[in-house]
Amino acid sequence: MPDLTAPSAVRRLDMPETVSYVGGMTVRGGERQLERAHSAHGLHLLDATYADTHVFPAPPYALEAFEEAASGGGMTYTPYVGDKGVIDHVSANVNEAFGIRTTGGSSTILTPGTQSALFLALSALIEPGDTVVLPDPDYLSTERTLRYLGAAVERVPLIQRADGYAELDVETFRSICASSTVKLVIFSNPNNPTGAVYAPETLELIAEEARARDFWVLADQLYCRLVYDNSYYGHISCFDGMEERTITTLGPSKTESLSGYRLGVGVAPVEIIERMEDIQSIAALRAPAYAQHVLSHWIAEDKEYVTTRISEYAHLRDVTVEFLNDSGVFEVIASRGTSYVFPKVLTDGSTQQVALALKEKAGVVVNPGYQFGKRGDGHIRLCIAQDESVWLDKLERMARTVREL
C-alpha cells in the first residue's frame, strides 16, 4: 500500500492552529462536519453562501459572446496569458473605468476565475518563511493559500466602523511593519466577509508603509463594482508610488453573475505577470478559451446592468439588515459593498453549533465566521442575493432557530 501521508503543504490547508476556536476541530474538520449535515424532515435547503444566479442572471452579452467564440469565432488554444485581442479590450476598459494603469496587454493576465489569479499572484511572490500581513477577518481562501505556500502570516484586526467603512488597527499594523521584513500586504476591498469598504485614510496608511518599507501589496478587488450608497472607493494601485508595487485581482463572477464562466483578471507589473503566466502554464494552461471573449464586453457594455444590480442588492441588504437587527438574536452593520452581510450571533452557542442548527433546522447553509479568521468567530456570513420572498421566510426560520439555541 503506498504511503498515504499528505505532503506538509496539503496538511497546512487544514489550519491546525484554529483548533482553539473551532470547537476542538480544524477549519477543514468543521467544514466537513457541516457538509455532512442534513436538514430535518427534508426541509428545502437554501445555500446562502453564494448568490442565486437564476434570480440574478448574467448580462445577455455573455452567452452571445461565448456562442460566437465556440462557433468558430475564437481560438481553442490561446496563449497561456490569454487571447491578445481580449486582453487589449480588458486592459483598456480597466484603465478607463478604474484608473488602474496597464502597460498595454503585457501587464494583464486572464485566469480561470479570480481565485486562480489570487493563487498565481501569491505563488509568483512568496517564498517559504516570507512574512505576509492579512486583515482579520478576510477572504476564507487567502490564508489557506498563504499557509500552503509556507508563508508566515501576521493578522491585523480589521475594524468595521458603524458607518460601514473598514480600517486596520493602526498600532498593530505599524508594529508588524516595523518589527519584521514584510514581503506582502494583502486585503480584499470591499472586504469579504464584512462588506466594509476601506476608508481613504486606511488605504493611505497601507501605501505609506509600502513605500517606506518597500513591500508588495495585493488588492483583491472582486467586488469593486458592487459598492452601495455612492460610497468612497479607492484603487490602491492609483495612489502615489503604488503602481509598481501593486497587484490587483478583478473579475466578473460576482457582480455580473458570471461565476460559471470561470474568468478572472490580474493586473501587475510585467515581471509579475510573466511569472504568473509561467505558473498558469503548468497549473491550468489558460482561462477557458471561448469564455475569455465574454471579457471583451465586460465593464464597457454593462454599466446600466450593474447600476440595476446595485439597486436590487441594496434593497435586499436593507431588508436583511433591518430584519437581523430587529430579531434580538443577530446584530449587524450594513455593508457598503459586496453581496454579503456579516452578522454577529447573540447566543452562547459556538459558531459551529449555530451553523449546524441553521442547516438542520432552518434549512439555510451559511459560512461560519471562523472560516475568515479568529475575529470572525461568533459571526456568520450571509449572501443576500436571493429570491426575496424565499429569503424573508428563511430569515424568519433562522431567527427562530437561534432563539431555540
Image: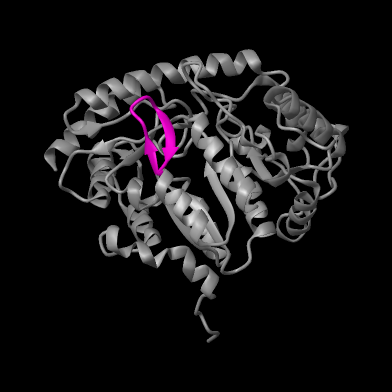
Magenta stretch in the rendered image: 158-169
Residue lying at the far left in this picture: please name it.
404
Compared with 8, 124 (above or below) is: above
Is residue 66 at all visible to an observer of this figure? no
Image coordinates for residue 384, horizontal then vertical, percent: 40, 28
Is residue 254 at all visible to an observer of this figure? yes
Counting labels gives: 0
Whether residue 160 is in magenta: the answer is yes
Whether residue 336 is in magenta: the answer is no
Question: Which quadrant holds residue 149?
Answer: bottom right
> What residue is shown at x 51% (from left), y 18% (from top)?
310
Image coordinates for residue 280, horizontal then vertical, percent: 74, 55
Quadrant where the image shows the C terminus? top left
Question: Which quadrant holds residue 158?
Answer: top left
Image coordinates for residue 353, horizontal then vertical, percent: 23, 50
Q: Nearer the viewer, residue 383 or 192?
A: 192
> What residue is shown at x 67% (from left), y 44% (from top)?
246
Image coordinates for residue 375, horizontal then vertical, percent: 34, 48
